[in-house]
Image (cartoon, helix red, strand yellow):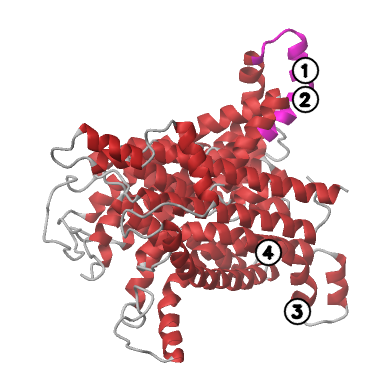
Amino acid sequence: MSEASLMIEAPPEGVSSRRGFVLHTLRHRPAAVIGATILVLVGLGAVLAPWIAPYALHEQVGPVFGHPSWSHPLGLDDGGIDMVTLLMWGARVSLVVGFAATFVSMAIGGAVGVISGYFGGATDTILMRITDYFLVVPDVPLMIVVAAIWGPSLFHIIIVIGILLWTSTARVIRAQVKSVRERVYVKRARALGAGHTRIVLRHVLPQVAPLLIANTVLTVAVAIFDETALSFLGLGDPSRTSLGKVIENAFERAAISSGAWWAIVPPGALVALIILGCSLVGGSLEDALNPRLRVAHLSARTFRLRPLVGRGKEAL
Amino acid sequence: MRGTDYVLKRIAFAIVTVFVAVSINFVLFRLAPGTAVSNLSRVPHATQQLRHALEKQFGLDKSKGEQYVIFLKQLVHGNLGISYENEQPVATNLRIELINTLPMVTLGTVFSILIGTLTGVIAAWRRGTPTEAVTVSSALGFYSMPTHWLGLMLIIIFAGTLPTGGMTNEFLLNPGFWQHLKDLGSHVLLPSLTLGLVLYGEYTLIVRSAMLETLGEDYILTARAKGLKPWTIIRKHALRNAMLPITTLVALSLGYVVAGAILIETVFSWPGIGRAVYEAVLQRDYPMLQGAFLLLTISVVVCNLIADLLYFKLDPRITT
C-alpha cells in the first residue's frame, strides 16, 4: 500500500509527471493523510501483536467482564481476557481476511477487466453480462447462503467475499484498458509484432496498476465489513478471533445486559476506524488518479459498503 | 424510437437476471451437503427400500434436468416448498415476514433521506467552513460503522427508555387501535433509526455534490442578485434541480435495504424477512433460505429496473 509514499515530501511546483501529480494531490488532501495514519497505526498494532500485546491471547488475567483499570485499560471480556490484547489479535485476523479476500477479488476482477477491455467483441459482451448479474445480486444474502452451505471456516469466508467483490474492479479496469488499448504506443507495439501477453503485461497493466491499488484499498474495507457481518450471523470461523467474532461473542454472552460496554464498544469502533481509514485513502487515491470521477454526477462511485448506488449507477 | 428501445432493453435484462438468479438458486442449493433423503433416512435400521421410497417421493430419482424443469414449474405456481422449521409453505412465511419488514425499512429510508438531504444541503451551502467538515465527516463516520454494532450502541444508549426488541409488547392485551399504533411506533423507532443512521451518509455526499453543481449555475446567481433569502434559493431553485440523483437513489436503495435489514432485524429481534434468513441459517432450513434469497434478489432487480426507468423518465438524455 501507499502509506510510505504519502509521507514523502511533495515535489516542487510544476512537476507534471503522474507520480508527482499524485503526491502533490495527496499533500493537499488532509483526508488521505488522516486515513493513512489510522491504517498505519492499526496495521502496526495488528502486525506486532505477538510481541507488543500486553498479555497472551487466551490467557485469563482477571474476573469475567472485569472493569477497565490501569493494568487493563479497556477491561476484560466474558472469559477474563484482556480487551487490548484481544483487539490487537482481532484486528490481525480481520486485516488478513480483508487483504486475502481483496487479493482474490483483484485477481478475478483484474483478469475479467483486462480480458474484456483488451479483446472486446463477443468476449467483452459475455463477460460484461456476467458482471451485470453480479452487480445486481444482493451480495450479503448471497454470502450468507454460500457460507451457510459451505460451513464456517476462515478460508471459505475469504473465498466467498473474494468471489463476490470483483465486479467494481472489473468495470474500472475494463474502462481503463479500453482507452489504453487505443493509444499510439500500444498500436506501435502491436505493429512490431508483440503478442497479446506481452502487450497486456508490459504496456496495459502498468498503466492501470495505480487505479487497481486505489480499488484494492476500497475493497479491503468492504471485505472487513462483510466479515464482521458474517461473524455476527454465526457464520464466522469459530477458531479464529476476528473483530467481528469479538463483537458477536460479547453480544452472545450478554455483555450489554451485564453493563460491560467495554467489551462491545471498542471492537466495533475499531472496525469503523479501519473502514473509515480505507475509504479516506482509497477515495483520495481514486480522485487523484482519475480526476474525471470528480464530476459530481459520477461521484457516487466510492460507495461500496452499502451499495445503494455504487453498483446500479455505474451501469448508467 | 431510441427511448422505447432503452426501456425494452432494461426490462429484458431484468427478466434475464431473474432467470439467472433462479437457476443459480437451483444449483447452489443442490450443492448443499446432504439431501432430504440422507437426512430422513438417518433413522436406525433404515432399509434400502425406505431410501428408494423416499427418493421417489421427493423426486430425487429423476435426472437433474427433470428436477430443474419441475423446480421451474412449481416456482411459476408460486410454490417455494415447505419450511423444515415450522412446516408451513415457504411462500406464506415469506409473505408475513415481508409485511413486517416493509414498515421498518420504509421508516428507516425516510430517516436517511431526511437526515441526508438536510446535512447535504448544509454542507454545500457552507462550503469550505468547519460546518461542512463536521457534517461530512460525521456522515462518513456513521457510514463506516458496522450496522449491527450501531444497533447495539443504540440499545446501550436507549435501554430503559425505548423497547429494544420485538415488534409489539406481548403483555399489552387487547390494545385499542391508537394504543397498538403507539406500541408499534415505539418498537419500530430504534431499528429504523439504525437503518437511517448507517445509510444517510450516502445521501449527504450525493446531495452535497448535486447541490454544489446547481449552486454554480447562473440562475442561482440571478436569484442571489434579486436579493432572495438563502432558504428560498435553496428550496425553490437549487434543491429542486438537485432532486434527480436523489429520486433514483431512493428507488435503488429500497431493494438493497431489504437485503441489508438482515443485521438490524437480528439485533432487534424484528420478525421480518432478514430475521427469517438468520433463523434459516441457524436451523439449516434450506427451503426457507432458498425462498428468502430468491425474494431478495427479485426485489433488488425490480427496484433497479424502477430506478433505471425513473432516471430515464426524469432525464431522457440517457439512452445507453
Q: Residue at x 68, y 41 (%)?
A: A290
Q: Nearer the viewer, mark 3 or mark 1?
A: 1
Residue A146 horizontal side relative to residue A169, left or right: left
Q: Chain of mark 3?
A: B
Dot 3 or dot 4: first in sequence order is 3
Q: Secondary structure at mark 3?
A: helix
Q: CA distance from mark 3 to mark 1?
A: 55 Å
Which mark is on residue A187? 1
Mark 2 falls on what kind of element? Answer: loop
B297 relative to A161, above or below: below
Q: Which residues are magenta?
A: A174-196
Residue that carries the numbered disc 4 in the rendered image: B246
| Foreground tag (3 vs 2) | 2
Which label's residue is closer to the chain start, 2 or 1? Answer: 2
- The three-letter amino acid code for the residue at tag 3 is Pro
Q: Taking A60 as reference, is B33 left or right?
A: right
Name which residue type carries label 2.
Answer: Glu
Give the residue at mark 3. Answer: B230
The residue that label 2 is drawn on is: A182
Depth-wise, is mark 4 or mark 2 nearer the camera?
4
Please report the residue visible at 76 percent of the width from the left and 61 percent of the height from the top: B213
Q: Chain of mark 1?
A: A
Q: Nearer the viewer, residue B221 or A168?
A: A168
Magenta-drawn stretch contains A183: yes
